[in-house]
Image (cartoon, rainbow, N blue to C red):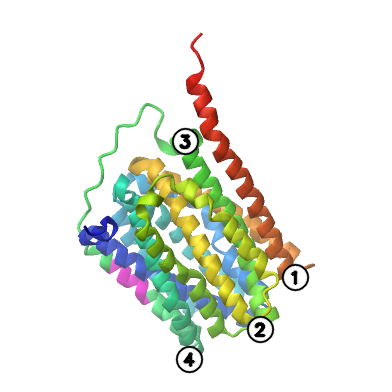
Amino acid sequence: MRQKGFGLLRRKPFRLFFISRILVAAAASAQTIAAARLLLDGTQSGLMAGMGVLIAPLPGVLFSLVAGRVGDSAPPRGLLVLYDALRAGLTLLFFFFRAPRQVTAVLLLMSVTDVFTSPASSRMLAAAGHGAILEANSLMAGATGFVSLVMPVLAGAIAGAFGADGAFAVSGALYALSALCLSASPAAPAPRPARPKQGAGGLKGAFRLILRRRGLLRAVLSLTALDFGTACVNLAFYAYAFDELGVSTAFWGLILSVLYGMNLVAMAILMRFKERFRARPDVKGALFLPAVAAVWSVYSISPSPAATVLCAAAEGLAASMCTALFSTALLDKAGYEFAARVAGVRDVLSAAAKAAGAALTFALMRRVKAGFVFSMSAAVLFAFSALLGVWMALGPRAAEKKTKRPAV
């Protein structure tokens, strides 16, 4: 019997959505490499270049809750076509605005469309159905991994040969192709949501849903903790790679390819053992959090660029497993009705965690080296993993005691 996850690709709406997300991931990768090149040329500092790339998208989080409400109230396919077309147009601004502040401003505009894209994409994944969400997330992780293996190196080579403008041109063309691809897709039959109870709709209902469902709350908090540590490590890594190791743009692209390319390996593992991972995906995801923390602690003592690449591979695999499993738990618990709004809330918390991590790291990096930030991030994630494990261990016992409590 064929695996159900690959059977999703036989559905034309999902297949075209899948292809469009590959194109978008490739476009975003090319844009990141080109923007980092412009910022590095303008500031002559790996730390400042990383700060520009990581911080510029964060103000867009102010629109996340609105994006979630819009995503649940309009057809997601049409929204994604609109957003991809807007991003293709906004990419043209990079050709005219070259100063570091101007590049950061354009990245901010791009981030607004990214914020609106996330809830709509989440709703498209939720439309796959309760039993197929893990497979859909696994396929998306694999697509991201494939693009990440190829695109950073390719974009780095293009930027090296034709300058940042060449990479920006590729990025804009890929966004336009994604919009065309989705526009050719027929409207997918969406699950018919149950009629919400009075007061259950809106953003207040999404917050209430997260607080009431422990599995959903654990998934949101775990992804937020992972985002905080990742923001710290990523910003410190820019300074570590460019200022301490002195890597070239091409080698930086190789590191990104390995880091994010491990999504492809994660997809293979999830699809091969999907029956084991489908039950309690939040518990399975929690097991990979300490692995991510362990790799971050090793970064601080990695002696060479080659060792750094190996660490990036280990981090990419563990982080991808965490993200896929916790995202599956999130969409599964939220359901199609609340998928976009819950994704909007998750994006708000994610951006807040990234902003806090970036601000803390920027302040620390003025006094310490990147290794200290790596160790600090690892310690924070280890502590969160321990608390999460205790919560998961005590949760079933508390529920069991509650059910066995005799009636008065």
Q: Residue 332 appears in which quarter of the rendering?
A: top left
Q: Are marks 3 and 1 in contact (CB under 8 Å)?
A: no
Q: CA distance from mark 3 to mark 4?
A: 52 Å
Task: From the image, tell me which residue sits under label 4.
Answer: 161
Name the residue rendered at 53%, 85% in the picture. 250
Task: From the image, tell me which residue sits under label 3.
Answer: 213
- For residue 153, above or below residue 399: below
Q: CA distance from mark 4 to mark 2?
A: 20 Å
Residue 175 horizontal side relative to residue 379, left or right: left
- For residue 31, above or below residue 233: below
Residue 236 shows up from this direction: no
Q: CA distance from mark 3 to mark 2?
A: 47 Å
Dot 3 alpha-carbon crowd within 10 angstroms: few under 14, some 14 to 19, many 20 or more:
few
Residue 246 is marked as: 2
Name the residue rendered at 51%, 77% in the picture. 33
Element class at badge 4: helix
Amino acid at dot 4: Ala
Depth check: give the residue in front, 280 or 247. Answer: 280
